[in-house]
């Protein structure tokens, strides 16, 4: 994730956007700055997930195997080098590299497609200038998955390995990561409000 995303005004945290239940789904009103942060982070996820690490190798080697493409298999057997992608697409079997590689070949492409669909659903429903967003239940599920992916990506930038970690006491105010701590907390608050609205 790039470091040029500015969070919404931290003084407005107590009145941060939150979802509420509406018939058939959930709704939320976003300020322009809030919408801008979410759209920027989701767009970065789309950019990261859109290109498979093996794409350049395939281009140099020729067309990918037809059967492999028809079955939706990935040419990637190794974990991604990018730490954010490695968090988004973790190993299936941490103690068995061979089984993990085979698992990745059979699942990574469908996972990429699902993550892209969720991210694009957020971009399609959230106006760049903010405003009210009304979601059906299936759209709520897509938002939840996309918000989770953003939080995973931001957690990599912050070095969070346990989501219960509290970095607010460990980072100085002039630490460039401090803005991301607030974004991470705000996204958790937003995600929780959406879950509550659905239940």
Image (cartoon, grey):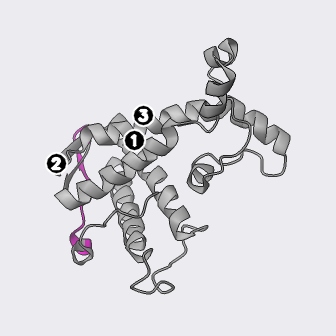
Residue 144 in view: no
Find residue 52 and report its image quarter. Answer: top right
Foreground pick, 104 / 136: 104
> In the rendering, at what x and y percent does residue 20 appear?
24, 53
Residue behind mark 3: 117
Mark 3, Cα crowd under 10 Å, few <14 / some 14-19 / many 20+, is some
Foreground pick, 6 / 29: 6
Image height check: is 184 above or below 131?
below
Residue behind mark 1: 119
Question: Magenta part of the protein: which range?
Answer: 13-25
Which residue lies most toward the front here? 60
| Tags 1 and 3 touching, CB below 8 Å | yes
> In the rendering, at what x and y percent does residue 121 appear?
34, 37
What residue is rendered at 69% in x and 35% in y?
76
Locate residue 16 relative to residue 138 in the image: left or right.
left
> In the rendering, at what x and y percent does residue 117 appear?
42, 34
Which numbered circle lies on residue 132?
A: 2
Query: Circle 3 sits in a helix, a strand or a loop, which is it?
Result: helix
Mark 1, Cα crowd under 10 Å, few <14 / some 14-19 / many 20+, is many
Q: CA distance from mark 1 to mark 3?
A: 6 Å
């Amino acid at each position: 994730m790039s470091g040029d995303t500015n969070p919404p005004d931290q003084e407005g945290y107590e009145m941060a956007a939150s979802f509420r239940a509406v018939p058939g789904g959930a709704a939320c009103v976003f300020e322009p700055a809030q919408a801008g942060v979410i759209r920027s982070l989701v767009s970065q996820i789309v950019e990261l997930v859109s290109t498979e690490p093996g794409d350049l190798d395939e281009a140099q080697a020729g067309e990918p195997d037809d059967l492999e493409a028809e079955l939706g298999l990935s040419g990637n057997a190794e974990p991604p080098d990018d730490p954010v992608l490695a968090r988004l697409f973790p190993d299936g079997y941490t103690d068995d590299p061979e089984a993990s590689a085979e698992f990745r070949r059979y699942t990574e492409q469908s996972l990429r497609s699902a993550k892209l669909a969720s991210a694009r659903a957020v971009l399609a429903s959230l106006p760049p200038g903010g405003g009210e967003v009304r979601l059906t239940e299936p759209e709520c599920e897509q938002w939840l998955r996309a918000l989770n992916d953003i939080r995973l990506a931001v957690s990599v930038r912050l070095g969070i390995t346990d989501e219960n970690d509290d970095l607010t006491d460990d980072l100085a105010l002039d630490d460039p990561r401090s803005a991301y701590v607030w974004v991470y907390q705000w996204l958790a608050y937003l995600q929780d409000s959406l879950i509550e609205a659905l239940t």
